[in-house]
Amino acid sequence: MDTKQIEYILKIAEENNITRAAEKLFITQSALNQQLLKLERELGTPLFHRSRSHWGLTEAGRIYVEGAKEVLNLKNSTYNRIYDISDARKGHLTIGLTPGRGLKMFTAIYPELHRAFPNLEVRPIEMRVRDQQAALAEGILDVGFMTLHEKDRTADNYLVLGQEEMAVIVPAGHPAAERQAPPSEPPAILDLKELEYEPFVLMDKQSTLRAVCDDIFSQAGFVPNILFETNNTGGIASMVESTLCCGIIPWYYVRRPSDKLARFCLASHPSWDVVISWPKTGYLSSGAREFLRLAQAWWEEQEA
């Protein structure tokens, strides 16, 4: 099933530029343009509004891209089904991973996945959660490793690996730090209202963690004084350690005690889910199912 032409057109649509698309496809711009012109002659209408710097889809182009994605999804599903009933144990598996621990998890479990499926072509991609959700919908990803609140889920399938509580962190020199519980005891609870006038560093608005934090501040009854926004969760702890501000992050990032910051729970114990997601209508290959099994075992080991 040759879908090269479809992939070419989708790449132009993704890049909004034929020059960049040709570079990503490792073909000449002239060859790519010939493929596009051939298709447009066949269809009798242009697929792109052309300009020097931006190629936007026409109405016909949007219809083509929508159908093309469905064709590629059908191709991938069909091939994976055939691979699963053959002895080759091969195929393609593209995995979305949250930055940081997603890659850490993949590195830990990949050797076993490779031993079970030596002919499986695995492609890990670090992507933020909302980007993963969009990529799953477009057929770019087969599965995604994510952290999010239940209300941020799409209509896709979700396997919950575990739940993770949020921690409030303050610099070690902050007056509240004196009330931190010893490492051997359960974390002390802090009333967030005590920090109403303190500066905070938070994840940016595109992050699912930011959505969780916004709910926490709403329940606390105040709008935080935001000193800085970042797209690096681990960087929040570093900034708090530098005594610049306070923060709210998952316990995963402060599970080990630090003499530079203090960790607290909130009375409502807000949390989010650690999940693996895959398309509702997609086919989950045997290689993908093995990845789910290994990811679940890895996460259980982290919680032990």
Image (spheres, grey):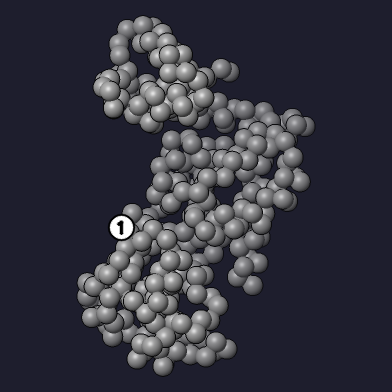
Most foreground residue, 217 or 175: 175
Q: Residue sitting at 66 percent across and 60 percent down?
A: 297
Vertical placement of residue 104 versus 66, above or below: below
Quadrant for residue 296, please give it. Answer: bottom right
- Quadrant location of the C terminus? bottom right
Compared to 33, does 86 lie above or below? below
| Residue corresponding to mark 1 | 205
Q: Amino acid at mark 1?
A: Lys
Tell me if 296 is positioned left or right of 150 in this view. right
On the question of residue 39 being in view, the answer is: no
Of 100 and 239, the residue lying toward us: 239
In this picture, residue 284 sits left or right of residue 263: right
Q: Is residue 222 visible?
A: yes
In the orientation shown, which residue stands out farthest toward the bottom? 178
In percent of the image, x 49 and y 55: which residue is there? Answer: 99
* Quadrant position of the N terminus in the picture: top right
Q: Position of residue 225 (x, y in %)?
A: 24, 73
Q: Is residue 94 above or below residue 75?
A: below
Q: Circle 1 — which element?
A: loop
Q: On screen, 230 above or below 137?
A: below
Residue beneath the point at 57% across and 45% down: 124
* Horizontal relation, residue 218 to residue 182: left or right: left
Density class for disc 1 (Cα within 10 Å; few <14, some 14-19, many ≥20) is: few
Residue 92: x percent and y percent? Answer: 62, 35
From the top left corner, tell me how far across and down residue 34 is, in percent.
42, 11
The picture places residue 282, in percent across and down from the top left corner, at 52, 37
Count of marks, rendered view: 1
